[in-house]
Image: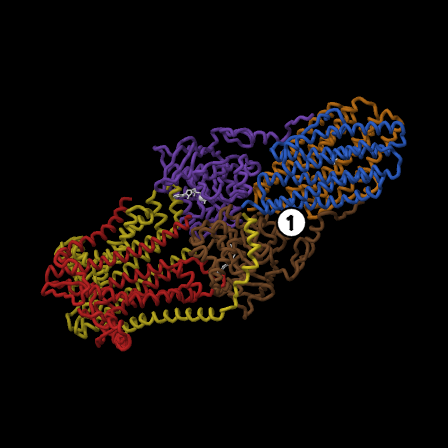
Chain colours: A red, B blue, C orange, D yellow, E brown, F purple
Amino acid sequence: MTLIAGASLLVVALMLAIGGLLIQDSTGARQVFGWSFLLPNLGSTWNPVTGQFQGWSFIYGTLVTSLVAILIALPMSLGIAIFLAELSPGWLRAPLGTLIELLAAIPSVVYGLWGIFVFLPAVVVRAGAFLSETLGKIPLLQVVFMGQIPSSGASRLAAGLILAIMIIPTITAVSRDVFRAIPMAQREASLALGATQWETITRVLIPYGLSGILGAAILGLGRAVGETMAVTMVIGNSLQGSYSLLLPGYTMSSVIANEFAEAVSTLHSEALIEVALILFGFTLILNGIARLLVWKIGSRTVEEARA
Amino acid sequence: MPRQTLDREFQHLQEEILLLGSMVEQAILDSVSGLKQHDLAIARRVYKGDAAINEKRFAIENAILVLIATQQPMAHDLRFLAAMLEVDTELERIGDYAKGIGKITILLGESNINIPVRELDRMAEVGVGMLHKALSAFINEDSDLARTIPAEDDEVDDLYNRIYHLLVASMISNPALIDHANYLLWVAHNLERTADRATNLCERTVFLATGELMEIETSSEDDELDEI
Amino acid sequence: MPRQTLDREFQHLQEEILLLGSMVEQAILDSVSGLKQHDLAIARRVYKGDAAINEKRFAIENAILVLIATQQPMAHDLRFLAAMLEVDTELERIGDYAKGIGKITILLGESNINIPVRELDRMAEVGVGMLHKALSAFINEDSDLARTIPAEDDEVDDLYNRIYHLLVASMISNPALIDHANYLLWVAHNLERTADRATNLCERTVFLATGELMEIETSSEDDELDEI
Amino acid sequence: MITQARSTLLFTTPIVKGFIQAKKGRQRRRAINFFWLGITGVVTVLALVPLFWIIGYVAVKGAPAINLAFFTELPQGMGSASGGVLNAIEGTVLLTVLSGLFAIPPGLLAAFYAVYHPNTWLGIALRFGADVLSGVPSIVIGLFGYALVVKPAGHFSALAGSIALAVLMLPIIIRTAEEMIKLVPKNLRAGALALGSPEWRAALQVTLPAAISGIMTGFLLGLARVSGETAPLLFTSLGNDRFEIGRLVQAGFRSGQSFPEILYNIIQQPVDSLPLTLYKYTQQPFPAQIQQAWGVALVLIVLILMFNIAARYWVSRQAAKNRG
Amino acid sequence: MQTISSTAGEVTSRELRQPQSPLVTIKGEPLPLTSSKFVLSDLAFYYGKVQALAGISITIPANHITAIIGPSGCGKSTLLRTLNRMNDLIPKTRIEGQVFLDGDDIYSPNVDVVDVRRRVGMVFQRPNPFPMSIYDNVSYGPRLYGVTKRADLDQIVEFSLQQAALWDEVKDKLTQSGMALSGGQQQRLCIARALAVEPDAILMDEPASALDPIATLKIEELMQTLKSSYTIVIVTHNMQQAARVSEFTAFMMIDQNRAGTLVEFGETAQIFTRPKNRQTEDYVTGRFG
Amino acid sequence: MQTISSTAGEVTSRELRQPQSPLVTIKGEPLPLTSSKFVLSDLAFYYGKVQALAGISITIPANHITAIIGPSGCGKSTLLRTLNRMNDLIPKTRIEGQVFLDGDDIYSPNVDVVDVRRRVGMVFQRPNPFPMSIYDNVSYGPRLYGVTKRADLDQIVEFSLQQAALWDEVKDKLTQSGMALSGGQQQRLCIARALAVEPDAILMDEPASALDPIATLKIEELMQTLKSSYTIVIVTHNMQQAARVSEFTAFMMIDQNRAGTLVEFGETAQIFTRPKNRQTEDYVTGRFG
Ligand SMILES: Nc1ncnc2c1ncn2[C@@H]1O[C@H](COP(=O)(O)OP(=O)(O)OP(=O)(O)O)[C@@H](O)[C@H]1O
Ligand SMILES: Nc1ncnc2c1ncn2[C@@H]1O[C@H](COP(=O)(O)OP(=O)(O)OP(=O)(O)O)[C@@H](O)[C@H]1O
Ligand SMILES: [Mg+2]
Ligand SMILES: [Mg+2]
Ligand SMILES: O=P([O-])([O-])[O-]
């Protein structure tokens, strides 16, 4: 009894310890830079030599790559999940599901490797060129689609696309489970009223599983935000005074991975830890939202079930 | 939302029982009036009409069984159904008495025996009245009413005794009439039994309403013939 | 594993019904032997013994109702229970006949009327025999046996007619005996009704076994008195 | 109440009936149905493209690098095409086993707690903590491992790396084990307790066996997950070209160390791992290292796919057992 | 000498012993062909290679309640689901024979399944309201069929809820979630939802088995009020329930090939008081198996 | 003039109208104190602040079957679980009053819960065999209590399975998983498992509600054979089942404070044919609510 309570305490302590350590170890940087570290400022500097550190470029990099990833991955994953859960014949279901999930099992370094040598040249470069030709000409969208994609393809777009591929299995697997967890009775109820299968999916199953699907999306987003190695390998790791997707960028995790081991000063490593703290904060917020969603919808159904 | 279906079926059964009751009452009254008027047509009608009473009786019994099988009545509902089964049988038997009187009317034919019309009339009237009241007490489960009815049997018994003595007297005075007098004695007996059976219904009713199984005994019990 | 509980309860009920049957049979036989021997002690015992029969009858009825309420019998089981309810009532009524005979024995007291012993004895014998067979046909649901029994009623009817004529003759020859002769007529009537009621049991049995509701009519129907 | 409803019914019947014109729009509904259902099939196929592309490409590029030496020798230095990645293979195994040892027992215990006390403050905090932990970027966990072990000890080590990986694995184990234990019908536990069994025996003899294959799946998935991780190892186990367990053990015996001492010595070494090696090699300009990187990628993928297939096998076996 | 002559009551029993006529009779009168809702003709059904139903021919009368009873696994649910082609959802199933709905074979190739399902509503074992408001639950079906005007929907919702004897209980909380109702109310909501698409027939697969006795009774009473306007077919493994609610009962069993067959079909009163078939008798009296 | 005199049969009915004596009677005879298994005295039970049971006093006779019936949520299961302290497992619950088992208050501080649970076995709504072999399922309890010799265990297993009317069906496959049995067999296995620790009483909470009618009947028949050696208390919301199996029936309802109370307790035959309480009558005839 005390043993299992102890184990549980350990988990909670771990979480607190991580947050605590990050806060403590970034104290110096915070004292020096204060809130300016977070300022949305494209001309932000990150100069270990002069000791000038501002985080906005990394924050933007992380946000925009994750956003691209989720925008692409969510609809695709939903489509796949629907196919797997609702349409595919029984014999195909398990192998297909396993294949998709295997995407998640490929180590991110391998993604990076494949990205550098195969995906970027073959796909991203072309897509980038196409986008800058088309969307890059449209006034407002220009901001994110201007400039010329590097010949290597290393860019925020590349990172976003790779992330999309990487989080598809996560979102797919969870939302497929969500669909499968929806009682058969819900489908039967709808079909027995004369609904088509698509009507059943859109009007009954998706609303029914909405919280689960949102949870899946947030889980995917969390993955994207925290992903390090693959992104580091394809994003170009450069500080650009631009919001464009087509240009190289930097993310929070990449900068930590690249610089922490060779941090030149205490302030530098403290600044990196502050970046890590921000990343941790993101995680907490996303988890908080996910919990809230699940708890709000979940508790309502529980309450209703009891009533 | 109580068990409307069961209640509806009960309603229906009660109506059927009352219908059977009125068929039987009519049969008794008709049979006596046929006897008084030496009207063989009426007598035959009563005699034949018994088949319809039997039929109704079986139909009701069947309906009760179906209700028990399909509606799983419990507690009071079940006791009421069981009581109805018995009432159903009792009524059919009273129908048989009417039939018997019809038959006697036919057997008497045009014989010129002196029928104690007033007494028989009165017996029929009281007996049928008892039956009628007993049925309504039963349907309404009015145990108070049910308890008062058997007292009327005293009058029936008195009448029976009077008729008996009248007929014995006439047998003695004219032995040739013994056969016919005996027929009339049967008539009186049947009417007396009718009242007895009404008393049975009352006992059922009291049982149903209060859970008391009892015989309501009348005062004449120990010294008269009517209880044989 | 069928419904052993229900089967056990059925078994028990059947035994109770048979017990009631033998109580009633004994009562009839005793009452007649009391009459033959002018034995007032026997007569009184029979008269009082009816209470036990009534009690048993109600106990059985109660057990049947409890069984219906608690065991939800269906189909044949239910029909059998319903039939038992009726058999139960019939047996009790036959008990009443025995009580009536006992009462007449008491009323006759030491009177010196000539009792048609042979005929009454035979009537009792045949009637009780019919009853006995009818009960065993019922318990075994032997519709073939049940169909053969009512034929024996013909003999009972003949005996009744014989007794009737004997008694009427004695009334004519000695009008002072009319009262007592009439008592004896009641005795014969009661025995004749006993046989009739055995016939009722047979009808029930046929119904139970075959689902046919029918009256087994005897040939005497249309020209004799016994059916009044 | 009923009669009232009925009368309203009679009143409304003629007005209401006939709203439904079933035939109307039927063709359109059918077309929409087929179109969208088709789309889902298309995206499913689309999603499989990168999988086969990656695996195929890695297999083609990596196969030439694979030979016996690749598995049995240490790296020969940058630019050399000979030599192998024995250090990384042994390091990966060591890190995986150690992290499993650190994460599985407390993970399992915590899972029981989460199931049996879902609504206590600790239960709620536990599940929230596990959720947050599972979302914390692995690079941050690497930093944590650095601060917790490396900095105080003053050197990188397998221990630090496996602790970081254990932190990564812990929430996976907790959540899968929790789900599996929750799937065990509650009244199985009640059944045992009703026989007078103490709680721990019920958990050990009844609940755990009922959930074991599902829990195994969780273990395997957790192991698969951490064996492909790079980021947390960057600042914890660092990497070690010369790491070779056999040599360390021999050296230990020669200097007369006891077995625990040898073990302790080993886990105090910085170690390499396959993903770490892969990452490092890709940063090199030498074609030989790039070539070997593809080989490492192939080995890594095969290893992890094997873990995954094993896990799936457990799942299907459990499903079969549940049906049985 | 004696004669056995039939008298009262025998009307019923004599007919019962006639060889079963091809037509259904109600209280002894043959049912006119026009009032049969479903006619199944030599129906067989297969799950893959396993035969679940064999040689089932049955005529289900319109505007009455027909119950299907039988031991577990005898194919009651399967049979029920052939009536609105819900079995189509299960892969690798096969049907032989015909199912006529108002005279049309619903398995003939050019039949629109969606329309069949509209005409034949279904209520399931566990109440399965959609996780949306009561109003949306009931209006779900009509909306599918293109009813969009709010006033029309309002009317349909009220009418359907009233028919399902639920209106009075929910009229003040139509926007509340359908799942916030009690089990019995949920089941009535599902009935209202089925009624809203104006079906002719309603199939119910053990509709009360998840409910407590009081809620069960309410559903049973509701069925009684609905039967004048709808044909109701109910599967129940509660024999007493079949006896209570239905007017016709079909008794099914597994034959020697382990496929479900029809053993006896008749008026409920007859099945439960004097079944013709020995197996039926054994089943209803609890002496089976 | 007439007199109303009591005759046959009234023996029963007169007693029934006597004010209820504190002692239980069986067929009119008062039950000797020694043959009561459980005595509950003014029991109240709380889930947190919510009172679920109030003022329950009841004497449960030994070696008979007692059924607890009542509408959903009236506290039947709660009451049952006070009898072997299974409610202890639910946090924040509180009990007032006493529960005597063979004269000892099982809630008094120095009582060994484990021992109470051994003496009072329990069978649950859904069959819950442990995921182990049939043999291990049955021997689980005895092993807990220190029986280790194989021969002893063999004997216990065989005896328990025989008592549970399952031996013949499983004697050739004792090593097979208990979960591979059919639902009805599983439930009998759970009964055998409970019997193996030689309890005095067995509590059953809707033991047949997940079973089909035939399996249900088998369980009911089994209860009949067990009752001579065990005190059985069964919760069921199937009134007919209570009527069929039990000899005593307790009818519970929610009082004005929404706590469960005992409305009537008596012989089953009496409760179902002539209940004394109006509410009981309404409930058993289906006129409640
Ligand atoms: N989806 C399915 N796939 C394969 N076999 C099935 C399927 N559904 C049912 N069966 C089989 O078909 C037979 C009939 O099943 P069905 O569900 O119709 O029986 P039932 O009479 O409704 O039983 P219950 O009373 O248990 O609901 C059974 O043997 C069952 O195992
Ligand atoms: N674990 C619990 N926590 C809080 N309240 C509970 C708990 N279990 C039961 N209750 C409440 O106590 C009351 C009685 O519940 P109980 O389960 O004993 O009723 P029941 O008569 O067995 O009902 P049913 O027939 O539905 O099983 C209910 O109002 C229920 O909501
Ligand atoms: Mg079914
Ligand atoms: Mg309960
Ligand atoms: O039928 P009885 O008049 O003889 O009772």
Question: In the displayed structure, would residue A199 be above or below residue F40?
Answer: below
Question: In the displayed structure, would residue C49 be above or below residue A172?
Answer: above
Q: Is residue E52 visible?
A: no
The quarter of the picture showing ligand 2: top left
- In this rendered view, identify the residue nearer to me: D148 or D83: D148
The quarter of the picture where residue B89 lies is: top right
Q: Position of residue D228 (x, y in %)?
A: 25, 63
Q: Is residue E69 visible?
A: yes
Mark 1 — on which chain does it sit? Answer: E
Q: Position of residue C155 (x, y in %)?
A: 81, 38
Q: Position of residue F95 (x, y in %)?
A: 38, 36
Query: Considering the numbered disc 1 on the image, is that residue within a helix, a strand or a loop?
Result: loop
- In this rendered view, identify the residue nearer to me: B26 or D209: B26
Task: Give the side of residue B206 with respect to residue E83, left or right.
Answer: right
Quarter of the image where the N terminus of chain A is located: top left
Mark 1 neighbour density, 10 Å: few (under 14) some (14–19) many (20 or more): many
Task: Give the side of residue B152 with respect to residue D284, left or right.
Answer: right
Q: Which residue is the extreme one toward the left?
A: A50
- In this rendered view, identify the residue nearer to me: D157 or F242: F242
Q: Residue at x 47, y 46 (%)?
A: F188
The quarter of the picture where residue F153 lies is: top left
